[in-house]
C-alpha cells in the first residue's frame, strides 16, 4: 500500500487541519454554535479496507456527499457520516422544532451544503498552500452501505483511498466523520510531489 514519509504525513495532517478549521468556522455560523473540527489521523487504504473501516455491515448505512476535482491532481472527494448522525447534523442546521418527516426531506439539501463547505474547505486549502488550481463539480448526495458509497466492489482495484478521520465537536454533540479522497496512482504521485514542493519551500523559508 502507498505510504508517505513521516514528514510528508505530518505536513498533510497540518494542511488538512487548516482546511477543516476553515470549515468549522463556516459551520459555526450556520448552526449558531461553536464547532471544533480536527483531523486526528490520515490513512492510505484500498477501497475494501476503507469500506471496512466505516463498517460494511448491511445494516450500517452511510450518508455521503461527493465532489469530483481536477487540476493539480484528480480525485473524487467524499464526506461520510453514519446515517443516524447525518440527521443530527441536519437538525442542528434547521432547528430542533422541525418535524422528523420534514427533517428527512431536508436531509439531502442540508447534507449537500455541509459536504460542499467541508470538501471545498479541505481542497481549497490544498490548492492555496500548493499554489495550484483544483476545480470541483457540484456535490452529489448518496445513502447506502460504505461499500456502495466508496464503490468498493467496482473495478478500481488500482485506486487508493486517502481517509481523513474527522472529529466534529459541538457543545452538545461529538460526531465522527470521514473524508475520503479516491486517487489513482498518477494522482497519488502528483499529490506527493505537491507535498514535497510545499516542504521544500517551508524549509527554504526557515
Image (tube, rainbow, N blue to C red):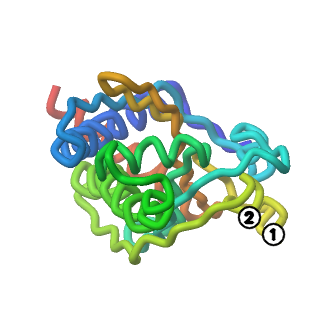
Q: What residue is at 61 percent from the left and 43 percent from the top?
A: 82
Q: Which residue is mark 2?
A: 151
Q: What residue is at 52 percent from the left and 32 percent from the top?
A: 176
Measure the alpha-carbon separation of dots 1 and 2.
5 Å
Q: Which residue is mark 1?
A: 154
Q: Is residue 129 above or below residue 65?
A: above
* Local SS, label 2: loop
Residue 131 image offset from top left, x and y in percent: 23, 58
Residue 190 image offset from top left, x and y in percent: 48, 59
Of residues 96 and 203, which is closer to you in this image?
A: 96
Of residues 5 and 89, which is closer to you in this image?
A: 89
User: Mark 1 and 2 residues: CB-CB less than 8 Å, in contact?
Assistant: yes
Q: Quadrant of the N terminus?
A: top right
Q: Is residue 183 above or below residue 85?
A: below
Q: Is residue 159 above or below residue 137?
A: above
Res. 159 image quadrant: bottom right
Q: Quadrant of the C terminus?
A: top left
Of residues 6 and 85, which is closer to you in this image?
A: 85
* Local SS, label 1: loop
Within 10 angstroms of label 2, few (less than 14), some, or many (20 or more) residues? some
Of residues 99 and 83, which is closer to you in this image?
A: 99
Q: What residue is at 34 percent from the left and 73 percent from the top?
A: 135
Amino acid at each position: 500500500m502507498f505510504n508517505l514519509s513521516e514528514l510528508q504525513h505530518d505536513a498533510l495532517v497540518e494542511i488538512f487541519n487548516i482546511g477543516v478549521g476553515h470549515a468549522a468556522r463556516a459551520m459555526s455560523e450556520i448552526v449558531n454554535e461553536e464547532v471544533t473540527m480536527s483531523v486526528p489521523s490520515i490513512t492510505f487504504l484500498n477501497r475494501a479496507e476503507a469500506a471496512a473501516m466505516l463498517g460494511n455491515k448491511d445494516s450500517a448505512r452511510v450518508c455521503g456527499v461527493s465532489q469530483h476535482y481536477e487540476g493539480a491532481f484528480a480525485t473524487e472527494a467524499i464526506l461520510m457520516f453514519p446515517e443516524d448522525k447525518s440527521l443530527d447534523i441536519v437538525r442542528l442546521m434547521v432547528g430542533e422544532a422541525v418535524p422528523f418527516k420534514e427533517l428527512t426531506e431536508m436531509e439531502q439539501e442540508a447534507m449537500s451544503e455541509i459536504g460542499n463547505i467541508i470538501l471545498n474547505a479541505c481542497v481549497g486549502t490544498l490548492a492555496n498552500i500548493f499554489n495550484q488550481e483544483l476545480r470541483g463539480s457540484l456535490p452529489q448526495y448518496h445513502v447506502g452501505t460504505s461499500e456502495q458509497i466508496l464503490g468498493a466492489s467496482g473495478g478500481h482495484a488500482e485506486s487508493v483511498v486517502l481517509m481523513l478521520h474527522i472529529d466534529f465537536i459541538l457543545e452538545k454533540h461529538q460526531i465522527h466523520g470521514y473524508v475520503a479522497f479516491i486517487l489513482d496512482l498518477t494522482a497519488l504521485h502528483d499529490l506527493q510531489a505537491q507535498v514535497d514542493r510545499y516542504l521544500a519551500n517551508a524549509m527554504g523559508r526557515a
